[in-house]
Image: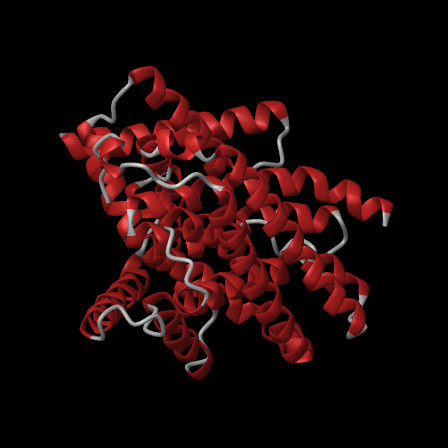
Amino acid sequence: MSIVNLPDLPGLEGALWIALTLALYALFSRLRAALGGNGLAQPLLWVSAILIAVLVLGDIELARYDRGGDWLLVLLALSTVSIGVPIYDNFPIIRQAAGAFLLAMAIGSVSAVAVALAMAHLMQLDAAIFATLSTKSITSPLAFGVTSEIGGLPALAMGVVIITGNFGVLVGPKLFALTKLHDERAQGLAYGVAAHGIGTAEAIRKSSLMGSFAGLSMGLNGVLTSIILPYVMSVS
Amino acid sequence: MHIVGGVLLLAAILAAAEAVKNAAGLMIPAPVLAIVILVVGLFMLRRVPSGLRLVADFLLRHMALFFIPALVAMVALSDVLAQTLWPLLAIIVVSTIIPLWLTAWVFARLAPTLEDADDKPEGGA
């Protein structure tokens, strides 16, 4: 292979997409800080919406954005591994509440799937969408594999998990204020179970303690659900 | 060099997780398996190496940034979403609020109160 054939990555276009993504993220992070951490000012949500609008309006293929976007996804994998650090830091606190942790996680996880499936059944959505929704309690990388296993639509599963995560992060602060659930451990646990990776990212931003509960419940719940679900779905 | 060491550690653990996953044919995504390996490793080491702490703090603080491409990829889903958008949104709204509240409520009822937060080892983030 001659030096001329070396891949041109990310290339001008890829570099511009990375720059645009970072600039928008920085802008919206400042905006959120200026608004006093307002829950509606989620940089993730608004930056993605703007980028999607740019792709749609400019009739630009997703693969072209991904020349830059793929670099950020590599960092997503590394930052997911990093969740181990706050889990280690807060392990004594987690162990002290282990029983409550497991029970609350199980109840929350089952309720998410049960509510989603009951509604899908009432609305008579088709079987593939039904199967897809049953994975909504699993974090996105896990949901992908499990969904195809049980006859759902993997791409839709990713979408559902991601919208779920964003919505959870959006309503979480209001919901917890309204119901007077101020315990950081409880909030973190709930974000991990109900809002997955995006919820965990938000919990970690708020505090190390909240983040450690979110990270552990996301991982544990995801693994347990993906082991149990294929059996449940094959019986039903 | 601290930062290089931290990134190296994370990448090596991720690689180990991928290898274990492939060898054992597991359905668990490698990053989740890697969390387990990291936590076990930290318990054996009994401390968080400073380079790892530095890198992990940065990555965790900006995790939302790294999710952006995953969200942008939903642009490819527009066909499916257009057909069942409203039923799906209704289901997502209800089936997110209920477990979010229920999980936190059950835990807050059952968990022993947090005695003294000073007890925990010094943490980042």
- Examine the image and state in which quarter residue B51 appears: top left
Q: How many marks?
A: 0
Please identify the residue farthest to the bottom as the structure is shown: A57
- For this orientation, the residue located farthest to the left is B1
Q: Is residue A28 left or right of residue B22?
A: left
**Picture coordinates of residue A53, whole percent (x, y):** 42, 79
Q: Of B79 and A64, which appears nearest the observer? A: B79
Q: Quadrant of residue B77?
A: bottom right
Q: Residue at x 39, y 37 (%)?
A: A81
Q: Residue at x 59, y 49 (%)?
A: A138
* B95 to the left or right of A24: right
The colour scheme used to paint the residues is: secondary structure
User: Given the current orientation, which residue lies at the most extreme top position?
Assistant: B44
Residue A228 percent across, percent down from the top left: 71, 39
Quarter of the image that includes the N terminus of chain A: top left
Q: Is residue B57 above or below residue A163?
A: above
Q: x%, y% of residue B41?
A: 37, 21
Residue B6 seen anywhere in this rendered image of the structure: yes
Residue A17 place in picture, x, y as percent: 31, 65
- Residue drawn at point x = 70 percent, y = 55 percent: A134
Residue A196 in view: no
